[in-house]
Amino acid sequence: MSIWVIFKLLGSLALLMFGMKSMSEALQKMAGPQLRHVLGAMTTNRFTGMLTGTLVTASVQSSTATTVMTVSFVNAGLLTLAQAISVIMGANIGTTLTAWIMSAGMSFDITAAVYPAFFLGIILIYQKKYRYIGDFLFGLSFLLLGLGTLRVTGTEMHLGENQALLNFFASFDPTSFVTTIVFLLLGGILTFCVQSSAAVMAITMILCSSGALPIYQGIALVMGENIGTTVTSNLAALSANTQARRAALAHMFFNVFGVIWILFIFRPFIDMVCGWVGYDVAMTKETVGAAAFLANAAKLSFVLAAFHTTFNVANTFILIWFIPQIEKFVCWVIKPKRVDEEEDFRLHFITAGFMKTPELSVLEAQKEISSFSERMQRMFGMVKELLNLSSSVSNKDKNNEAEFNKLFSRIEKYESISDNMELEIAQYLESVSDAHLSDDTKAKIRAMLREVSELESIGDACYNMARTINRKYAAKADHFIEKQYEHLHQMMGLTDQALTQMNQLMGGRKESFNVNRTFNIENEINNYRNQLKAQNIIDVNNHEYTYAEGTIYIDLVNECEKLGDYVVNVVEARMGTRQREA
């Protein structure tokens, strides 16, 4: 075997993997938002969830993409974990379509058809309206070209006549259970190392179709691929949130359970599938001759695809009745992480390595921004509590003074967290924007970058108020008079209403959000600020309090008004409307 043949084999696998990736991403660009809506709407019970997972995965040719979308909906509270498990079961069925595409590519010479597809694809790519269809055609063409080249390379390598290879496979007892386990583990390890079950499936098809690898060992490799791909997703999910890790574990449980029960009826099950395809298991080269043997072996790629589909359908039919038990099991194995909210600097939803699809990364980033938004309202609640403590405690009360200082330290910590969150989310969005994205998604990323900037400004405004209250408290100055506290509480109440409206928008759908409510609250805040500023001058002139106290009081009022402006900016960015003048 020459070095060039080996490079041709490796290059063909690279083409295949790149084609799969490009085709999947192009499909998600064309139908990503619609598929997300379908996932959210069509999972009313376990059966519709399974059907939805099948259709979505078959549409985007990526079970990983479907799983990621599903976990995102679980985190958002749109799906229960049980519904997500049913979708993941369906995704296992939908991903078997890939094996059928590959078996067709292995059985027929389709390389001649890819060149017109390349030509048509490049024309469509340069037409803005149809460029995603062009991307899809390019990905599909690379996939088919890789498969065609693999088929030709496999023929050139004469694997069925390679005595060393035949001797290697012959050294394993085909009737031994240990042989099946060895090839099962080998399939899992290869898939884990290559990080592509499609590539390992292609190699298996070449070995089987050439007559070098017996069908039973080939199917053991396919079963190993099913487990190997779930090991990868579980390792990637280690840094993810609890629900993502539970979904990954449910995926692994599904495949491992399927492999266990299939091992008990291994040969009868395979013989049944071979009978459906028309493959003669008992045929040998010595009894019928090389030509008839290779013609029979050529059907093996379809046998592998048929087994892959039958296995996943049968496994789903068995396990779909036990989804509540599977949910309890994964929740028992993976307990929620118990962390102090103030000490938790790690992002909850954005996880490096788990998101493999740029279009879907935006969905995770949006959920992270919603979490950021909720955190900022909690921070504002602490500022209100700090103001209450400053009014009710005596400077001589050491316990209350310690409580005040502890709360101020928490606010300082939150301000640091808000800076870190802005930086990390922005860096994540910038890395996502480097990929090929649809125009809608690019616009979303621009809006989200503005959202995180304005949310960080809300954190700054909260911290400025806390510092102002702390300065007054530390100076042991006189308290505000009762009228000032009433005005500040009323102003902060309006500001808190604005934050609540913002969080309703960030956690829900913008189509059902009444943006005028936010604008009305902002107008109330602005009018009340102007009223308080005018009244402050009168009160200072009437010597109700000192000018210095009035300055601190109006500083707090102004920060509330600024915070309200930042809230409006976040809402406008989310709604996609023009920024208003403050």
Image: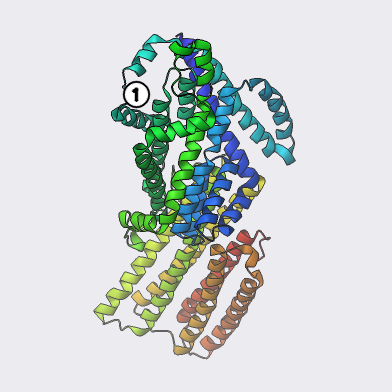
Q: Residue at x 60, y 66 (%)?
A: 568
On the image, the x and y values in percent for residue 358 come to 55, 43
Nearest the eye: 379 or 227 = 227
Identify the residue at horizontal 58%, vertical 47% (top origin): 55
Image position of 389 with respect to 109: above or below = below
Is 415 drawn above or below residue 130 in the view shown? below
Q: Quadrant of the N terminus?
A: top left
Question: At numbered mark 1, what does the secondary structure look like: helix, strand or loop?
Answer: loop
Viewport quadrant of the C terminus:
bottom right
Give coordinates of residue 378: x percent, y percent: 44, 69
Examine the image and state in which quarter residue 529 appears: bottom right
Callout 1 crowding tier (Cα within 10 Å): few <14, some 14–19, many ≥20: some
Residue under label 1? 174
Residue farthest left in this picture? 398
Lateral position of residue 579 relative to residue 317, left or right: right
416 relative position to 295: left or right = left
Most foreground residue, 26 or 394: 26
Q: Quadrant of residue 534?
A: bottom right
In the rendered view, does 341 fall on the left or right side of 495?
Answer: left
Q: Is residue 473 above or below residue 76?
A: below
* Residue 196 visible in the current orientation: no
x, y percentage for residue 452?
Answer: 53, 56
Can residue 533 be spotted in the picture?
yes
Q: Amino acid at mark 1?
A: Pro
Q: Is residue 32 above or below residue 391?
A: above
Quarter of image, res 103 = top right
**What residue appears at the point 46 percent right and 79 percent down from the top-left corner?**
548
Indicate the position of residue 61 as horizontal and vertical percent values.
56, 39
